[in-house]
Image: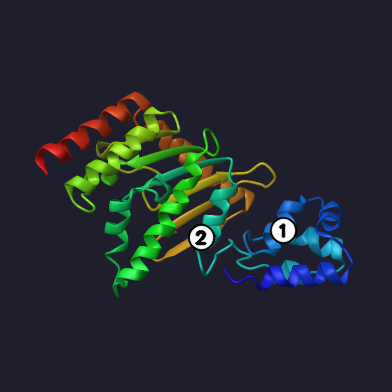
Amino acid sequence: MSNTYGKWLKAAREAAGLTQQQLADKALMTRSHISHIEAGRRVPSEEDARRLDMALGTGNVLTSFRPGADDDVLADYFSPVKHLEQQATAIREFAPSLVPGILQTEAYARAVLGRSFPSLSRAERDRAVVARLERAEILKGPTSPAVWAVLDEAVLRRPVGGPEAMAEQIDHIIALTESERIRTHVIPLGLGYHPLLDGMLTLMWFDDQPPIAYSEGLRMGRLHDSPSVVEAFQADYTLAMSDALPLKESLAALKATSKGYREHG
């Protein structure tokens, strides 16, 4: 994501002789939220930009310049999400076809990242795998963030990397779930259509910022912080959750699928 907005905000703040805390007080925001915007880790909402313009006396300059003003579309679409994952207190994932990045094993990640075209060099692929596995570091904390993963059954049935890699990947999800580090629910293929089937979705909550949503499709992703859009995604997630298998049945489905890969791979 371009950090031009953040640089403009910092320049305007410094020109006004304000610290981040002083601007936060005037704009009725938190200092950390100002810091994230200036560093390019957050896209300001329309309300954020309006408050910043009022606090800095910049008319509607920051409001009109706000990137993705209609729906917070980011050009470099995943980079900000990686930063936000580190700050989140709760994460809700939905995956229609691939295991979410924070849950991927090395073998699974290598299989996913090794299928790009044009293909990555070995060094590029290694760096990409390391970067993906680093995202899973957030799961080493005992409780935070609280992570829920809703997986379409197709995620389990597609043999990414082959039977051995899939068995290892599913066993990893089972271990995280049985240790109560995450909760996992499976949406059975027999359900047919459900509200989240069109693409990947991540919902995140924070201590000092409003919740956000991130949706992803083929070679594109969108970070949403419009309250109405986020609430709509949350409603879709809740509806899909109501159709998913309960935790105990989901674990049974995971174990049966892993066993099938090991026995018939």
The reply to whether discs 1 and 2 touch (Cβ–Cβ < 8 Å) is no
Position above or below: 202 against 9:
above
Residue 43 location (% of width, % of height): 63, 61
| Residue 59 visible in the picture | no
Can residue 104 be seen here? The reply is yes
Q: Residue at x 10, y 40 (%)?
A: 264
Name the image colouring. Answer: rainbow
Q: Residue furthest top?
A: 248
| Viewer-nearest of discs 1 and 2 | 1
Question: For residue 259, which numbered disc appears in the image?
Answer: none
Q: Quadrant of the C terminus?
A: top left
**Viewer-side residue, 200 vs 126:** 126
Q: What amino acid type should be assigned to the residue bearing mark 2?
A: Arg
Residue 59 or residue 161, whichever sits in front: 161
Q: Residue furthest right?
A: 17
Label 2 crowding class (10 Å Cα cut-off): few <14, some 14-19, many 20+?
Answer: many
Q: Position of residue 158 (x, y in %)?
A: 22, 49
Q: Tell me: residue 205, above or below residue 21.
A: above
Give the farthest residue toward the left: 264
> Residue 66 appears at what percent x and percent y?
68, 67
**Quarter of the image where the N terminus is located:** bottom right
Q: Residue at x 79, y 61 (%)?
A: 52
Residue at x-position 41% and y-position 52% = 133
77 relative to 176, above or below: below
* Labels in figure, total: 2
Name the mark on residue 222.
2
Please report the residue visible at 62 percent of the width from the left and 60 percent of the height from the top: 41
Q: Secondary structure at mark 1?
A: helix
- What amino acid type is highlighted by mark number 1? Ser
Whole-angstrom CA distance, mark 1 to mark 2, is: 21 Å
Give the structural element (helix, strand or loop) at label 2.
strand
Residue linked to disc 1:
35
